[in-house]
Every structure is written in structure tokens, then in C-alpha cells.
């Protein structure tokens, strides 16, 4: 398996309406908007004498889209890294879904329900788009290593559990048909059932983000906009309770940003909670419910998009003028 790496630019496609999708395959449980899902409590992170985060605190409720903004170097991605286990905070704590996650490893935090994308696209370039998303769905599989290797225990699959036959590639479609017939005749292992369920979910997520027509294409060859959406689909494949998007509109033209805005709203409509880092203020103001603003590692403002846009400290941070002048 290749390691993730940065990939090259291109265009993005159209989004299908939700009513055309198997929503039950990709939707999250209905959120409770009164419940705090994430609590960042006075988090401080130091690198030697450099204070990257200084007593940052905010909360995120289920079903909410929260924007985390600030000038370059404000500490936004560092905050993501603390939340997802890349860095351990020097002081303070992060609580997610009523569990203390400060100091846990990234894969443990992902299993608890936090998934993220990255500023620089990180995909498996030699795997297909479908396989990349299946890497995400694999996070929820329960088969043991011996069970996956030997596949001894076999069961009769239900019709909706059988593998898909929908590839645009002729040879791949023949293989899918052979695999399906074999499963009907000989039965399947639990590992195969999980794998096929993951494949079905992955394919539906590719439809959801608008790139199903490239499911069997190598990730390296996909246009830039498709790669961005593929990374979002892979994150959703882990069945997160919280999706963290780190500058998902970077490199997009205005039309692509409008499509992304619709996509983020659709993600919330499916029941997911979203934390968004983004520099495009039009996108942030158009999609978020609340905004937290960082500057030099400190929180300087929090509120609705309208409140934040009028805040003198925010204006000063972005325009580089004194608060009195702002």
C-alpha cells in the first residue's frame, strides 16, 4: 500500500440531490442540538518557548457547523492537531462525546468518532477512488486478523448484502459478476460481508460527493476538485460523529466553492457535526452557525457570523489595524 502524498490540480463535478441516494447507508444518527459533543477547555500548547495555543476554549453542539477562523499562523490547524491526537496539550483538556481524549493516539480518537481532512490533500495515490474510501470504512470492521486471513466461517448472504455489479470497466464488471455468483452458490465469510458492506457505503459516499463516475480511477489521476471531495468521502467512510475540514476550499474557483458550500450543508443534513477551518469568509459566513476566531494562539471572538463580522477585534486581526481604528 502506498503512503498518502500531495496530488496535482484539476476540476470538480456536480452534486446529486439527496433524494437520489441511499441515505440510510451514509447518514448519521439524528443529532441532539442541546448536547455538547466537543469541549475544548483552556487548551494551551507550547513548543519550547513558543506558545502555539494559549488557553483556547470553545464548545461544539451536535448537528452544528462551527467555523474556526483567523489569520495565517493563528493556531487553527494546531488546534485540529490537538483535537485529533497529533499533539498532546501542555495544559487544558479536550472532551469528546463525554470522553477525555487529550493524549490519546490519532487512531483511537478516530475510533471514538472524529475524522478529518488536511490542508494539503493526503490520499493513497496508487489506489482507486473507491479503494481510498474503503480504507475509511475499514475503521468500523470487526473481523479479526485470523478471520480475515482464513475466512473459515461462512454464511448465506442476503440479496442486499451481495457485492455490487456496477463498474464502468468491462473486466472489472465481469469480476464483480463472478464474485456475486460465487457468493450466491458457496456462501460468504463474515469478513467478506463487512468488506462488501464497506464497498457499498464507499460507493454511495462517492455518489454523495459527486464523483461516482471516477470510482475505479487511480486517485493520482483525478482532478484536484475530485481529490478534495474524495478526501471528504474517505473521512465520512469512518462513520464519524464529528467531521473536521481543514481549508477544504483551498485552490477552488468561485463555482467550485459554491458546490462545496452545498456539500457541507448536505453533510449536516445527513446528521453529521462539522468543524470547519477556512480562509474564504464568504464561504464561512454562508455555511456556519457559529464562528470562533483565533489570533496568535488566543481566542479573540466567538458568536454568530453576523456578530463576528462586526467585532472590532476580528476586523483589527484581519485588516492589520488597531482596535480603536477598527
Image (cartoon, rainbow, N blue to C red):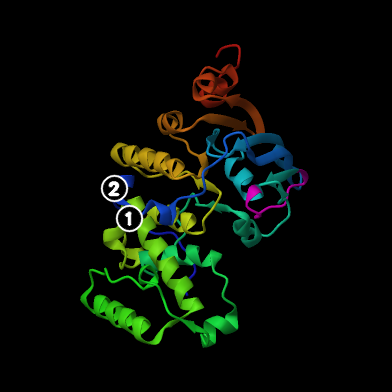
Magenta-drawn segment: 83-92
Q: Earlier in the sequence, mark 1 or mark 2?
A: 2
Residue furthest toward the left? Answer: 170
Q: Residue 207 magenta-drawn?
A: no
Give how far apart the Cα atoms at labels 1 and 2 are: 7 Å
The answer to whether residue 15 is seen in the rendering is: no
Image quadrant in which the C terminus is located:
top right
- Residue indicated by mark 2: 16
Verify CB contact (< 8 Å) between mark 1 and mark 2.
yes
Task: Using the image as rendered, state which of residue 279 and residue 38 is in the foreground.
Answer: 38
Task: Using the image as rendered, state which of residue 53 and residue 148 is in the foreground.
Answer: 148
Q: Is residue 217 left or right of residue 132?
A: left
Q: Position of residue 120 (x, y in %)?
A: 47, 53
Q: Position of residue 54 (x, y in %)?
A: 72, 36
Mark 2: few, some, or many residues within 10 Å (few <14, many ≥20)? some
Mark 1: few, some, or many residues within 10 Å (few <14, many ≥20)? many
Amino acid at each position: 500500500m502506498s503512503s498518502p502524498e500531495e496530488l496535482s490540480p484539476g476540476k470538480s463535478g456536480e452534486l446529486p440531490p439527496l433524494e437520489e441516494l441511499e441515505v440510510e447507508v451514509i447518514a448519521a444518527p439524528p443529532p441532539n442540538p442541546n448536547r455538547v459533543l466537543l469541549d475544548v477547555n483552556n487548551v494551551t500548547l507550547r513548543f519550547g518557548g513558543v506558545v502555539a495555543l494559549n488557553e483556547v476554549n470553545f464548545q461544539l453542539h451536535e448537528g452544528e457547523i462551527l467555523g474556526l477562523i483567523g489569520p495565517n499562523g493563528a493556531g487553527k490547524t494546531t488546534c485540529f492537531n490537538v483535537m485529533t491526537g497529533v499533539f498532546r496539550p501542555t495544559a487544558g483538556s479536550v472532551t469528546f462525546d463525554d470522553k477525555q481524549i487529550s493524549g490519546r493516539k490519532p487512531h483511537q480518537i478516530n475510533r471514538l468518532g472524529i475524522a478529518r481532512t488536511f490542508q494539503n490533500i493526503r490520499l493513497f495515490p496508487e489506489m482507486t477512488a473507491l479503494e481510498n474510501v474503503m480504507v475509511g470504512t475499514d475503521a468500523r470492521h470487526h473481523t479479526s486478523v485470523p478471520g480475515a486471513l482464513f475466512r473459515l466461517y461462512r454464511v448465506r448472504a442476503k440479496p442486499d448484502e451481495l457485492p455490487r455489479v456496477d463498474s464502468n470497466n468491462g473486466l472489472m464488471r465481469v469480476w464483480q459478476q463472478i464474485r456475486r455468483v460465487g457468493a450466491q452458490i458457496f456462501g460468504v465469510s463474515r469478513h467478506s460481508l463487512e468488506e462488501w458492506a464497506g464497498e457499498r457505503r464507499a460507493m454511495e459516499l462517492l455518489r454523495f460527493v459527486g464523483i461516482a463516475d471516477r470510482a475505479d480511477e487511480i486517485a493520482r489521476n483525478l482532478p484536484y476538485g475530485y481529490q478534495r471531495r474524495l478526501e471528504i468521502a474517505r473521512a465520512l467512510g469512518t462513520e464519524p460523529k464529528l467531521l473536521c475540514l481543514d481549508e477544504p476550499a483551498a485552490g477552488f474557483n468561485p463555482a467550485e466553492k459554491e458546490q462545496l458550500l452545498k456539500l457541507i450543508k448536505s453533510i449536516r443534513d445527513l446528521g453529521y457535526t462539522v468543524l470547519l477551518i477556512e480562509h474564504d469568509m464568504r464561504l464561512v459566513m454562508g455555511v456556519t452557525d457559529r464562528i470562533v476566531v483565533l489570533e496568535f494562539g488566543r481566542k479573540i471572538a466567538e458568536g454568530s457570523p453576523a456578530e463576528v463580522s462586526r467585532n472590532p477585534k476580528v476586523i483589527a486581526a484581519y485588516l492589520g489595524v488597531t482596535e480603536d481604528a477598527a
